Amino acid sequence: MTKELHGSTMTAKVGVALLLAFPAGMTAQRPSAVVTPAAMRTLAHSYYEWRDSVYPVNSSSQGKHRWDDRLADYRMPAVTQRRQHVAALLTHVRAIDTDGWGKDDRIDKVLFQAQLEGAAFFPRVMQPEESDPQTYVNEASNGVFSLIQKEYAPHRMRAMAAAARLETVPGMLQHARANLVHPVRLYAQLAIDAVRSGDDLYTKSLMVLADSLGDQERARLVKARDDAVKALHSFADWLDARLRSMPDWTPMGETEYNYLLHRVLLLPFDATHVATLGEVELARYRALEAMLKNPNYASPDPARAARIPADQAEFLKAYEARLKEITDFLRANNLITIPSYIGQFQIRQLPEAFKPTNPGGFMNPPGIYDDDPTGFYFIPTYDPKSGNFYIRAAIEDPRPILGHEAIPGHFLQLSIANHLQDEIRRQHGDNTFVEGWALYGEEMLMREGLYPDQSPSQGQVLRLARYRAARIGVDVNLQTGRWTFPQAVDYFIDGGGLDREAATGEAAGAAASPSQKIGYMVGKWQIMRLLGRYRDAQGASFRLGAFHDQLISYGSLPVSVIEWLMFDDEASIKKALGK
């Protein structure tokens, strides 16, 4: 919800008008009028509305279905205009003077500015429209996926929206060929793999929506689908023919990486600090694996399972059945409060189109705008003989992964974040806290006694922590230019204990999405540090569940901001911002 302009003045309204009316692409100057906290929040709301309209696929994924029949405009003048608009708005927000503002208002300004920093950083540094063919392949696949993942409207309505989106795919891919002036070989290969393994999304999953269409409507959907699939394969062939001439992936460099850590993620660490933390935690969890009475417990083995699922359907049901064990344990031990509005958490099969960069699957929480509180976890296709770590782990004991993805992890935490009344905080999705909380939850459940001592389940938790620690070294060293891509894959295998398939996918994800991989262990370490401080402050009245409830009541905010809120301590945020 947008906050009202309580006590707003004519000066504040003029200040907002100046900011909103400032044309994209012009040189921004310091605002001549005073901007109040209320005016700043109005500005933020206007930005979110604009962002949602120009990125309609993301809006659909977040539960806003006003533009379900559109894809983003990828004509280069439109791309440039979006970048200029964000850059001009960021310049304005940077210049807002918060002297005399209260703590909560200053926090919201810091958060809004960080959101804009992120929106400006990745287009400026990575230039995805010019370098990453996945941008366009993902727009097509996510454009369909976002319409079929939830039953938010009748099949016919969603099928016709999908038809409209698919009809624009061939044109979008023509713009892609013009835009991709320096495509990166790694990204192109990932895009090719996604296209060539992704037909089922369009030919099977999508067609579930066609059951109520008339003949003409069905013919329109089928034609749009076939034309889009043909255009995607033609695009993949076009990329394949140019693959050898494409430049290798290159890192952003340490200066830009540190900017990302400080200004976007609001971390009080630089790349060297983060890399050191990764080395320390990797050494710790490798050693903890070795201290198991049977160190082989750290490598999941379906042969140890009481029952091996017969097929994919039974595999999915086994996941869901174990979630109740976790929630019962949390309630019995007063470890966290599960609000009454929390919806169902469902397990589904991972679409083939998403396998190249998501070898372990991914979680879809309720969107910011969703009326439906349901969440989904998409897991890889079941294969009892698979060497994939995630499949082996899920067969032996899915609870560690469920604790991460569902409750108390992502599904619970993000559902609570979606209910914040403060719009700026509700819109903030700090990956470091989100992934840190989920990883913290894995070990917390283990240490609080969910699993038998010296069991494969404990071993799995240690291995999961180990490879999340390995992710830090890969992300930092890839993006700062210290390692090559093959070195990163080998480090995941040796340091993280992953199989080559999972290690290659992980390294590709680190190259394509810088800083995403560091979030798990860096966020967990920050939360552990906060927990110790909280316990010391509470003394005899300390209760672990109370800490958890307070921590996730703030939403998906950077831990440096949570520290400010929880302890009235600005030290970490000042360090992040260089103040």
Image: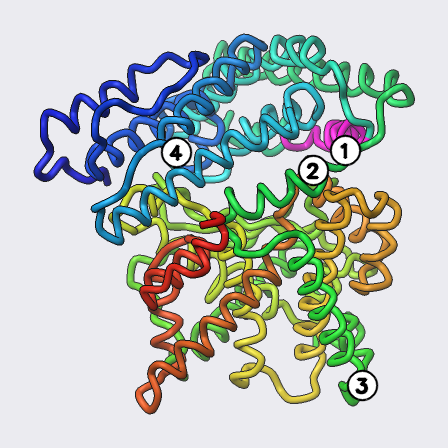
From where the camera sits, is residue 386 visible? no
- Give the answer, above or below, for where 115 lies relative to 214: below
Q: Position of residue 485 (x, y in %)?
A: 84, 43
- Give the answer, above or below, for where 261 lies relative to 21: below
From where the camera sits, is residue 469 visible? yes
Q: Which residue is mark 4?
A: 94
Asked whether disc 4 touches disc 3, contact meaning CB atoms under 8 Å apart, the reply is no
Instruction: Of the two numbered discs 4 and 1 on the same chain, state the one appearing first in sequence.
Output: 4
**Kind of residue sitting beneath label 4:** Arg
135 and 511: which is toward the camera: 511
> Of helix, strand and loop, which mostly describes the magenta segment?
helix
Magenta-drawn stretch contains 212: no
Q: What is the spatial separation of the Cα atoms under label 1 and label 2, in whole angstroms?
A: 10 Å
Q: Which residue is mark 1?
A: 190
Q: Secondary structure at mark 3?
A: loop
541 and 340: which is toward the camera: 541
Asked whether disc 3 touches disc 2, contact meaning CB atoms under 8 Å apart, the reply is no
**Kind of residue sitting beneath label 1:** Leu
Q: Position of residue 323 (x, y in %)?
A: 51, 68
Instruction: Of the two numbered discs 1 and 3 on the same chain, state the one appearing first in sequence.
Output: 1
Q: Secondary structure at mark 1?
A: helix
